[in-house]
């Protein structure tokens, strides 16, 4: 079960605590810390809401001489060094007394007083020695920063024989002095009662504490935090438990007896923040959900759930332009290339190899939370789901995506809308370039490149370096200099190459049909001649015909073949064709040379190959973009 454990270190705030007056409306205003019977007497004060927004946790003062709290013989809890802490709410923007110790109006002497002085909208702390109230040389005054009416303030005054200091909401002002502390045995300590100079208090007070030492800055910060309700005592008694439970704090110190919550606890934020602060490079941690003082977690904030099913739940409901329920932000401030940073890190695991579990380090659902479609038995780093909302995206990446390993899917769509494109041109003459690309079978170097997660077994594909020479648009290079192939980009090339081959086959088919017709005609002529010859055997008749191929495209076999130094290739190119080339290619498909044939008609070229390696080669006659014929030649 997820149980709350918040440890507030209140033990230091109990040291040298002489008097504690929570001013909660529970029937008593007492000092349970020292055991001294210095309970306060209430005069015309009423219960009201305190600084935490809770009902009946402070007293309202009416602003007249009959409304105050009297702590008789309080000189026993005061001394030459003292700190007084209190929460104060001022209703009226006028000068008025808040806390003071005075002997009475008969001799007008006092020990100290905290009051407002509204001509400057400030709090004022006055400390004085025996003497007439109107003698300025007999008292020292410290003013605070400006304040406003109708707001809670945390006030701390500190006085000793050399310095007087006043804190308001953690901000301090101080003056040096040489007045000795003065306490009158006959004078009470009073909250809210004015004297003949300053008016009575109109406002609220709660949680008044008196120490015979100086509070530290950290203690003042803790006392002034509205989210921390630090109790006055360890044992607690009526009127002294700051949290209402009589405990010293929410939770307990590590190693002490368990002090579980007795119910649900609420801390109204009242537009403030709940902060856990530590010093720079501190190793202190906050654990939620753990039933033990365990700081072994990997983070500053460690949350463990062993029953409910959700360790951290984020929910944002605002009218802002950007709403974020959970946000992660990680920065390597030293720009160290060896450091790995994660904004959000999710890890997936199934305990005990549970084959019925579907686990995901990070899961995202579009339009509703539904885990029924998650694959059973799979352990997933990042899972996205939008099946319940057709047309929405289970994952959306605005930028390049790098996948190390296999990609599985039933359908892949690439943006190809004409509205996205400009300068559209149809591909031409791709067959020749395609003939220069070779396919290979290969194995990945999985041991040498383990971080690439290459698959095992025989693979089929291209060599990126070779493809880049022919179609550089299909090859990309990463930041490490490694090349990758866009295999999808080969599809339009193969399509156009197929169409070109189909047109070539159609033309060749037409040529064959014409040649076949010519052969049939020649056969008929031969048969006719033979018949005429048989008819005219008795005579000496004779005839002759002349055959030529001036209108046919001809590529002859090179002579001699095989050859050692040179060989000759005869050809015939009719004049009606525009462009003709003879292209020489190695047995691996590499083009050695392309020779343009400028003069049409019968001709020949002589090939010199003294520096050519022995082996088999081929040459093709290409006329107006069509490969007419290919011959094999051998160099030895």
Image: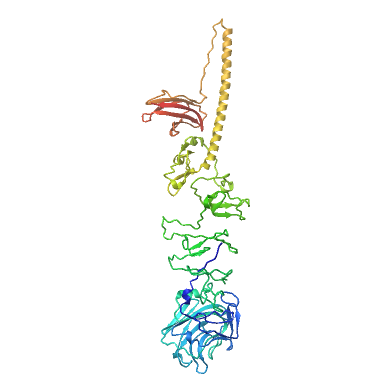
Q: Is residue 142 left or right of residue 536?
A: left
Q: Nearer the viewer, residue 190 or 65?
A: 190
Which quarter of the image is occupied by the C terminus? top left
Count the labels in the image: 0
The answer to whether residue 219 is above or below residue 332 is below
The answer to whether residue 224 is above or below residue 396 is below
Q: Nearer the viewer, residue 144 or 169?
A: 169
| Residue 444 on image: x %, y % | 45, 41
Q: Tell me, yes or no, if residue 88 can be seen here.
A: no
In the rendered image, the residue lying farthest to the top is 538
Which residue is depicted at the point 42% across and 87% down? Answer: 180
The answer to whether residue 556 is above or below residue 327 is above
Residue 25 image-quadrant placement: bottom right
How is the model colour-coded? rainbow
Q: Nearer the viewer, residue 184 or 94?
A: 184
Q: Nearer the viewer, residue 423 or 598?
A: 423
| Residue 162 on image: x %, y % | 41, 84
Residue 244 image-quadrant placement: bottom right
In the rendered image, the residue lying farthest to the left is 610
In the rendered image, the residue lying farthest to the front is 257
Which quarter of the image is occupied by the N terminus? bottom right
Which residue is depicted at the point 49% across and 49% down? Answer: 402
Q: Tell me, yes or no, if residue 302 can be seen here.
A: yes
């Amino acid at each position: 079960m997820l149980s709350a454990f918040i440890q507030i270190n209140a033990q230091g705030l109990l040291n040298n605590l002489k008097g504690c007056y929570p001013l909660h409306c529970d029937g008593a205003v007492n000092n349970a810390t020292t055991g001294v019977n210095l309970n306060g007497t209430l005069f015309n004060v009423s219960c009201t809401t305190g600084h935490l927004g809770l009902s009946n946790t402070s007293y309202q003062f009416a602003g007249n001489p009959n409304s105050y709290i009297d702590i008789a013989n309080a000189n026993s809890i005061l001394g030459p060094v003292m700190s007084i802490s209190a929460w104060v709410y001022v209703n009226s923007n006028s000068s008025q007394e808040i806390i003071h110790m005075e002997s009475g109006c008969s001799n007008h002497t006092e020990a100290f007083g905290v009051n407002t002085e509204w001509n400057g909208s400030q709090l004022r702390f006055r400390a004085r020695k025996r003497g007439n109230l109107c003698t300025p040389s007999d008292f020292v005054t410290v003013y605070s920063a400006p304040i406003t009416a109708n707001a809670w303030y945390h006030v701390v005054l500190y006085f000793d024989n050399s310095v007087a200091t006043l804190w308001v909401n953690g901000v301090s002002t101080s003056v040096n002095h040489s007045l000795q502390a003065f306490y009158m045995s006959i004078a009470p300590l009073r909250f809210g009662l004015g004297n003949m100079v300053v008016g009575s208090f109109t406002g609220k007070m709660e949680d008044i504490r008196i120490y015979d030492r100086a509070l530290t800055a950290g203690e003042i910060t803790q006392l002034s935090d509205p989210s921390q309700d630090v109790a006055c005592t360890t044992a607690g008694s009526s009127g002294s438990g700051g949290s209402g439970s009589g405990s010293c704090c929410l939770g307990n110190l590590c190693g002490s007896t368990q002090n579980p919550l007795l119910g649900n606890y609420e801390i109204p934020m009242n537009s403030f923040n709940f902060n856990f602060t530590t010093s720079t490079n501190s190793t202190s941690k906050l654990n939620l959900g753990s039933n033990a003082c365990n700081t072994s977690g990997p983070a500053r904030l460690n949350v463990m759930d062993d029953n409910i099913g959700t360790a951290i739940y984020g929910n944002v409901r605002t009218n802002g332009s950007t709403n974020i329920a959970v946000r992660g932000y990680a920065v390597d401030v030293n720009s160290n290339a060896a450091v790995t940073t994660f904004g959000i890190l999710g890890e997936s695991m199934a305990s005990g190899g549970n084959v019925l579990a579907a686990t995901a380090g990070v899961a995202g659902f579009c339009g509703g939370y539904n885990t029924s479609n998650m694959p059973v038995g799979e352990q997933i780093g990042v899972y996205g789901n939008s099946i319940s909302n057709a047309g929405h995206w289970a994952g959306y990446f605005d930028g390049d995506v790098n996948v190390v390993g296999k990609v599985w899917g039933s359908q892949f769509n690439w943006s190809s809308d004409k509205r996205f494109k400009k300068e559209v041109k149809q591909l031409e003459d791709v067959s020749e370039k395609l003939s220069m690309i070779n396919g290979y079978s290969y194995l990945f170097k999985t041991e040498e490149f383990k971080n690439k997660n290459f698959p095992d077994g025989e693979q089929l594909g291209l060599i990126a370096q070779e493809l880049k020479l022919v179609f550089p648009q299909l090859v990309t290079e990463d930041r490490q200099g490694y090349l990758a192939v866009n295999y999808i980009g080969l599809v339009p090339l193969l399509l156009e190459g197929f169409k070109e081959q189909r047109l070539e086959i159609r033309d060749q088919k037409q040529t064959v049909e014409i040649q076949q017709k010519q052969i049939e005609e020649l056969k008929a002529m031969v048969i006719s001649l033979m018949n005429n010859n048989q008819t005219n055997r008795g005579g000496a008749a004779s005839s002759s015909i002349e055959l030529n191929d001036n209108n046919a495209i001809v590529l002859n076999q090179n002579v001699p073949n095989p050859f050692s130094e040179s060989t000759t290739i005869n050809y015939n190119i009719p004049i009606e064709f525009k462009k003709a080339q003879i292209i020489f290619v190695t047995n691996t498909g590499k083009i050695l040379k392309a020779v343009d044939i400028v003069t049409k008609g019968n001709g020949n070229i002589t090939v010199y190959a003294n520096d050519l390696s022995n082996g088999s080669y081929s040459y093709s006659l290409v006329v107006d973009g069509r490969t007419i014929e290919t011959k094999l030649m051998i160099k030895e």
